[in-house]
C-alpha cells in the first residue's frame, strides 16, 4: 500500500493527534478530566538492548490488541537507481520467513541464489552496448525458468493465512516518504504468536518471488501514476518543487528503476536501513506490560543490534524564484501550488496546521466556501499542511480541480486572493476558535480505535523520540494566536517560494503533440 502522503501528514498533524488522544481518554476512562499523569499509568515503554523500542498501552476494553510498527525508513532513504525500493521491501515483508512460506528452505535458498545470478547475467547482457537480441533473450529465458523453479518451493500466502486462522484482522502496511508502517490486530491470547511472526519476518526476511512482486509494483505505478491525471501532475509537481531533496520523487519510484533494481539491492537496503534502532512498535489493547515484555525480550531481543542508518545528507536549497510546470492533458483542469516550510518538528508546526484548517480544511474553510460553494469555479479545493512528508523540510500545498467550463486561471486568482488575505490581516477570533472546537468535536466523534491510537503513538515516538508529544502538541495548538498565523503566513506565502503545477485541458490529438511541461 502506498499513497500515504496525505494521510501521513494528517497523522502527524496536531489536530489529528488531539483527536486520537482525547478519543482514547474518553473511551478508556470515565473520569471527566485526565492528563498526562493519568495516561502514563497505562503506558509502559521498553527499549531492547538492540535498540528496538516498544510502547505498551493497557486498554482492556475487549479481549483484542492492535499493534503498529513504524520503521523510520521511507522513500527519502533511496538513492538514484533504486527509487521505489522502500515500497518494494514493504511488499517483501508479507512473503514469510525461513520457516513460513516455504516447503524446503534450504533448497529454496539455493534456487533463489541461482535466480539472482541469472538476473545479474541478464541485466548485464541487456545493458551491453550493441547487445545481440538473441543473447539477451537467451539470458532472459534462463532467468525466467529459474524463477519458476524457485517458485515450486513457495507456500503462497502462508503468512497471511496464519494470521487469518488465528483471528487476526486488518493485516496491511504502508510506505511513504518518511517511514514504513506495518499493522494488524489479534485476539489478546495471541501475543506470543504475534511476537514469533513479527520478529521472524524482520530478523530473517526472504526475498522470494521478488521479481514477480516487482511486476505487481510496476502495475501499481501504471494505474496510480501513469494512467492517472492527478498522479502524473503530482509527480511533475514534486520534481519541480524539490530539485535536490529525495522528496522530489514519488514513493512508487521511477519505472526504469522498478524495471532494474534487484533482490540484491533490496537486501543491501535492508542491511543498511532496517536496523532494530529504526523500529518503534506500539501495542494497544488487552495487554499488560509485565506479561508481554518477557515475550518481546525472548523473540525480538534475539535480533542482533546493527549500526543505525546514516542520516540523510541532502538539504533542499532555498528556492529563489517561482517555478511552473504545465501538463497538456485531456483531463479536466487541476491546479496545485506549494510553498516550502520547515519540518513537522519545527515549533511553528501547529501554526501550519491551523492555517491548513482555516484555508482548506473541509466545507467551512475559506477556499471551499469561496471556490466551491460561492463562485462555483472548482469542484474540489483543499490544502495539506505537509506534503509529501514531514520529517524533513516540506511543502504547504493547495490543490483545486476546476469545475466544468472553468479555468485554472480563475481558480488561481481566487486562491491567490485568499492566500494574500491570510498574509495581510489576522484571522478572526471565531475562525481560530473554530480550529480548536473542531478538534474537540472530532475527538468526541472519533472515540479512537486501538489502531488509530497505535498509529499515533508509534509515529510520535518515532518522529519526536517521545510519545508524550501527543499531549504537548495539543498544548501548542491551544497557544496558537492570530498574530502567529499572520507571522507564519507572511514568511511562507512568498512568490519566490512558490511552485505551481497544472493540467491544461486539451484534445487527445493535441495532447500527443504537446510538450509535457515547461
Image (cartoon, helix red, strand yellow):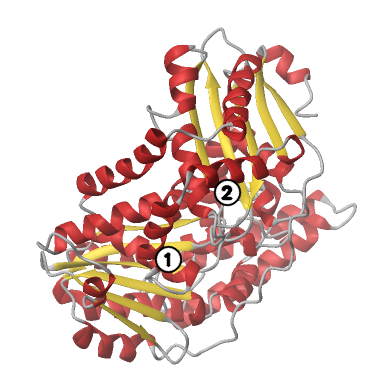
- The residue that label 2 is drawn on is 388
Residue 325 is situated, as x and y percent measured from the top left of the image, at: 74, 31
- Tell me the SS state at disc 1: helix
Residue sitting at the far right:
130
84 in relation to 320, above or below = below
- Tell me the SS state at disc 2: loop
Instruction: Identify the mark at residue 330; answer none if there is no mark.
Output: none
* Image-based side of 391 in relation to 508, left or right: left
Who is closer to the viewer here, 223 or 229? 229
* Image-based side of 238 in relation to 403, left or right: right
Who is closer to the viewer here, 40 or 310? 40
Who is closer to the viewer here, 261 or 105? 261
Asked where in the image residue 518 lies, by quadrant, the reply is top right
- The residue that label 1 is drawn on is 460
Q: Is residue 311 visible?
A: yes
Residue 70 is situated, as x and y percent measured from the top left of the image, at: 43, 67
Q: Please name which of the two marks, 2 or 1, marks the residue nearer to the observer.
A: 1
Who is closer to the viewer here, 41 or 110? 41
Residue 475 is situated, as x and y percent measured from the top left of the image, at: 38, 59
Task: Give the class, few, some or many, for how many residues have Cα within 10 Å of label 1's Cα (few <14, many ≥20).
Answer: many
Amino acid at each position: 500500500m502506498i499513497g500515504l502522503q496525505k494521510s501521513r501528514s494528517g497523522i502527524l498533524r496536531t489536530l489529528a493527534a488531539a483527536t486520537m488522544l482525547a478519543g482514547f481518554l474518553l473511551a478508556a476512562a470515565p473520569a471527566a478530566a485526565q492528563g498526562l499523569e493519568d495516561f502514563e499509568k497505562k503506558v509502559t515503554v521498553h527499549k531492547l538492548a538492540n535498540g528496538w523500542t516498544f510502547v505498551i498501552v493497557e486498554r482492556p476494553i475487549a479481549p483484542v490488541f492492535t499493534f503498529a510498527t513504524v520503521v523510520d525508513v521511507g522513500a527519502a532513504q533511496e538513492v538514484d537507481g533504486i527509487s521505489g525500493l522502500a515500497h518494494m521491501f514493504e511488499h517483501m515483508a508479507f512473503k514469510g520467513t525461513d520457516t513460513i512460506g516455504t516447503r524446503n528452505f534450504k533448497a529454496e535458498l539455493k534456487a533463489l541464489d541461482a535466480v539472482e545470478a541469472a538476473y545479474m547475467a541478464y541485466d548485464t547482457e541487456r545493458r551491453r552496448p550493441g547487445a545481440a537480441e538473441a543473447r539477451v533473450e537467451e539470458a532472459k529465458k534462463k532467468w525466467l525458468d529459474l524463477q519458476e523453479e524457485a517458485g515450486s518451493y513457495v507456500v503462497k500466502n502462508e503468512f497471511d493465512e496464519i494470521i487469518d486462522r488465528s483471528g487476526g484482522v486488518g493485516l496491511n502496511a504502508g510506505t511513504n516518504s518518511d517511514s514504513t508502517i506495518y499493522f494488524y490486530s489479534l485476539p489478546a491470547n495471541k501475543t506470543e504468536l504475534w511476537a514469533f511472526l513479527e520478529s521472524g519476518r524482520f530478523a530473517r526476511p526472504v526475498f522470494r518471488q521478488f521479481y514477480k512482486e516487482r511486476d505487481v509494483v510496476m502495475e501499481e505505478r501504471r494505474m496510480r501514476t501513469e494512467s492517472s491525471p492527478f498522479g502524473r501532475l503530482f509527480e511533475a509537481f514534486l520534481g519541480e518543487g524539490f530539485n535536490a531533496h529525495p522528496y522530489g520523487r514519488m514513493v512508487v519510484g521511477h519505472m526504469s528503476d522498478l524495471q532494474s533494481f534487484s533482490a540484491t539491492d533490496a537486501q543491501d537496503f535492508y542491511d543498511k536501513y532496517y536496523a532494530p534502532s529504526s523500529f518503534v512498535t506500539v501495542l494497544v489493547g488487552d495487554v499488560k506490560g509485565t506479561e508481554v515484555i518477557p515475550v518481546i525480550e525472548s523473540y525480538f531481543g534475539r535480533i542482533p543490534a546493527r549500526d543505525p542508518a546514516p542520516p540523510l545528507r541532502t538539504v533542499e536549497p532555498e528556492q529563489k524564484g517561482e517555478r511552473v510546470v504545465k501538463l497538456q492533458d485531456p483531463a479536466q483542469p487541476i491546479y496545485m501550488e506549494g510553498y516550502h516550510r520547515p519540518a513537522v518538528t519545527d515549533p511553528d508546526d501547529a501554526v501550519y496546521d491551523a492555517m491548513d484548517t482555516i484555508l482548506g480544511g473541509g466545507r467551512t474553510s475559506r477556499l471551499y466556501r469561496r471556490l466551491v460553494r460561492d463562485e462555483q469555479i472548482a469542484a474540489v479545493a483543499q490544502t495539506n499542511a505537509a506534503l509529501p512528508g514531514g520529517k524533513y523540510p516540506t511543502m504547504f500545498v493547495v490543490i483545486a480541480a476546476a469545475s466544468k467550463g472553468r479555468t485554472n486561471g480563475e481558480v488561481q486568482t481566487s486562491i491567490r486572493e485568499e492566500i494574500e488575505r491570510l498574509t495581510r490581516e489576522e484571522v478572526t477570533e471565531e475562525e481560530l476558535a473554530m480550529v480548536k472546537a473542531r478538534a474537540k468535536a472530532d475527538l468526541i466523534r472519533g472515540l479512537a480505535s486501538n489502531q488509530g491510537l497505535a498509529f499515533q503513538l508509534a509515529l510520535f515516538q518515532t518522529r519526536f523520540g517521545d510519545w508524550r508529544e501527543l499531549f504537548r502538541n495539543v498544548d501548542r495548538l491551544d497557544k496558537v494566536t492570530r498574530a502567529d498565523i499572520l507571522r507564519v503566513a507572511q514568511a511562507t506565502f512568498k512568490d519566490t517560494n512558490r511552485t505551481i503545477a497544472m493540467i491544461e485541458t486539451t484534445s487527445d490529438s493535441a495532447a500527443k503533440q504537446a510538450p509535457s511541461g515547461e
